[in-house]
Amino acid sequence: MMIYLLLLSVFILSFVLTYLVKEYTKRKSIIDIPNHRSSHTVPTPRGGGLAVVIAWLAGISVLFFVNSINENLYFAFLGSIPLIIVGIIDDVADVKPVIRISVQSLSAIWALYFLGGFQVIDFGYFSFSNVYVNTFFAFFIILWFVNLFNFIDGIDGYLASGVLVFTAALFFITGNTSLLILSAAVFGFLIWNWQPAKIFMGDTGSTVLGFNFVVFAIYFQNYDKVSFLIPLIISSVFWFDATLTLIRRFLNKEKLSSPHKKHTYQRLTQAGFSHQKVAFLSIFINIIFAGVAFFAINNPDYILISFLSVILVLFFIVKTADRKKMFKSE
């Protein structure tokens, strides 16, 4: 009974705080003004992710004080606090990239310390267990997910709805209650963020969500023996789009730090799809890939094959999107 009350409380807290942040940012003119790089056309308040992270940290802190969350996992999540501070500043005034990366590195090291590094990567029929190499790899994976979740947060409801599917799928696989806390916090925000969005998440929320996702993935591999590839399969729509877009821009010799709207989900909106339609399409694909993850969990020898199959399907989807809106050089 207590968990249901906690989930309801986290949802209400996130919902109310999102409204308060929206009103505050409007008064203070902390507004995302559309430009030629934007996927929206109406000036919209940003910074709603602050409500998500406050509700999230409040929820898992309750779990901690009633001994319902692993202590190491809880302290690993607290590594997001530097990200929150920088995210708040960045939502108001631009923070230099070197400062952002430095803070993200601090958060990654913090999390990996409390998680005990990255012990093993399970590929199904074989595993790689050099903890030093794995931890070095995990450090950069955390940095990449922190940033790619920020890149993916470009249209109404897209990031938040994706995270809801991810957390639901991982909960059914692991039974970890803290996933439900994150779902409740994100859902309270999503109501305000669904098309037409009344507020955007901003760096504060997107970076922390990316951080949390990798922390969960490493924790489940280390403690629950759930292959790291399973969360990658579930979240593949996001990381594949962000990674492939970065590679294509690099091959085009574009300035990688410059803003753009070349991600597949952005090009679909340019081709005439509404934000809502793209979000629903993403939800549908995410649910299918969650099914692939369930299959892989029950058939461990096929984990790597399932992972590679998902990549192949996503490549086909991207090429289909290319026919709708070409990926052009700048």
Image (tube, grey):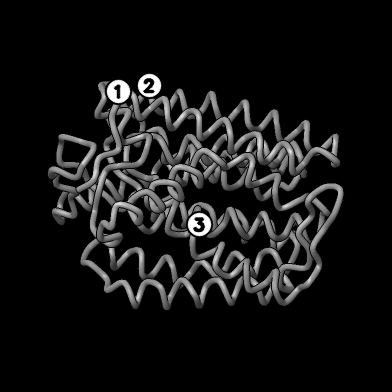
Q: Amino acid at mark 3?
A: Phe
Residue at 37% across, 48% down: 248
Q: Provide the residue designation for mark 2.
A: 277
Q: Earlier in the sequence, mark 2 or mark 3?
A: 3
Residue under numbered circle 1: 274
> How far apart are labels 2 and 1 at the CA level?
5 Å
Q: Which residue: 64% across, 70% down?
A: 75
Q: Residue at x 66, y 40 (%)?
A: 308
Viewer-proximal residue among 31 and 170 = 170
Foreground: 222 or 246? Answer: 246
Q: CA distance from mark 2 to mark 3?
A: 25 Å
Element type where label 2 sits in the image: helix
- The residue under label 3 is 145
Q: Amino acid at mark 2?
A: Lys
Residue 162 appears in view: yes
Reading the chain from its start, which is encountered first: label 1 or label 3? 3
Rendering coords of residue 289 (x, y %):
63, 31
Q: Horizontal placement of 77 versus 252: left or right?
A: right
**Residue in view at x 47 percent, y 56 percent:** 53
